[in-house]
Amino acid sequence: MSALSSRKDIIGLCCAKSGGSGSRSEAQEAADNEMANIQLCLAIGVPILFNRLLFVFGFTMLLTEVNHLETKFDANFTLLVGKLMEMDSRLSKVEAKLGL
């Protein structure tokens, strides 16, 4: 028994219990199929979009953190180069006094 035929049977039983004719028009079945298609597209599409947004957000956060670390590294490197230049200048003065 397929899912569609069991669905029709259940709908027929519900309509028969409520005093209805037990049969549904083709327009109602088409509307149900259309709704099922829309629900299927939403059930697949919404999680895909959510995952894509999470990926973009995570990637953006990663790039922001990398840029922050790069800026911090550049500042520390510049400070280190400045200290080395200062030390070179002091050593040059000491060498000049000692005549080396």
Image: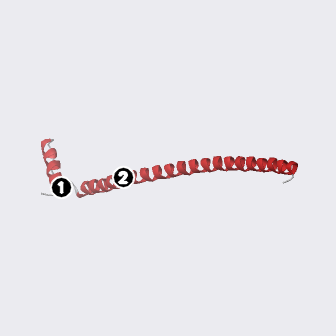
Quarter of the image with the N terminus is: bottom left
Tell me which label, 2 or 1, sits earlier in the chain.
1
Determine crowd level at label 1: few under 14, some 14-19, many 20+ residues with C-alpha closer than 10 A.
Answer: few
Q: Nearer the viewer, residue 29 or 57?
A: 57
| Total marks in image | 2
CA gap, disc 2 and disc 1: 20 Å
Q: Is residue 34 visible?
A: yes
Determine crowd level at label 2: few under 14, some 14-19, many 20+ residues with C-alpha closer than 10 A.
Answer: few
- Measured as percent of width and height from the top left, residue 49 is found at 43, 53
Left or right for 65, reference 19: right
Image mark for residue 15: none
Residue at image coords 74%, 49%: 84
Q: Amino acid at mark 2?
A: Leu
Residue at the disc numbered 2: 42
Q: Amino acid at mark 1?
A: Ala
Quarter of the image with the C terminus is: bottom right
Mark 1, secondary structure of its residue: helix
- Measured as percent of width and height from the top left, residue 96 is found at 87, 51
Q: Nearer the viewer, residue 14 or 47?
A: 47
Mark 2, secondary structure of its residue: helix
Q: Is residue 21 visible?
A: no
Image mark for residue 3: 1
Q: Nearer the viewer, residue 48 or 36?
A: 48
Left or right for 41, reference 76: left
Residue at image coords 46%, 52%: 55
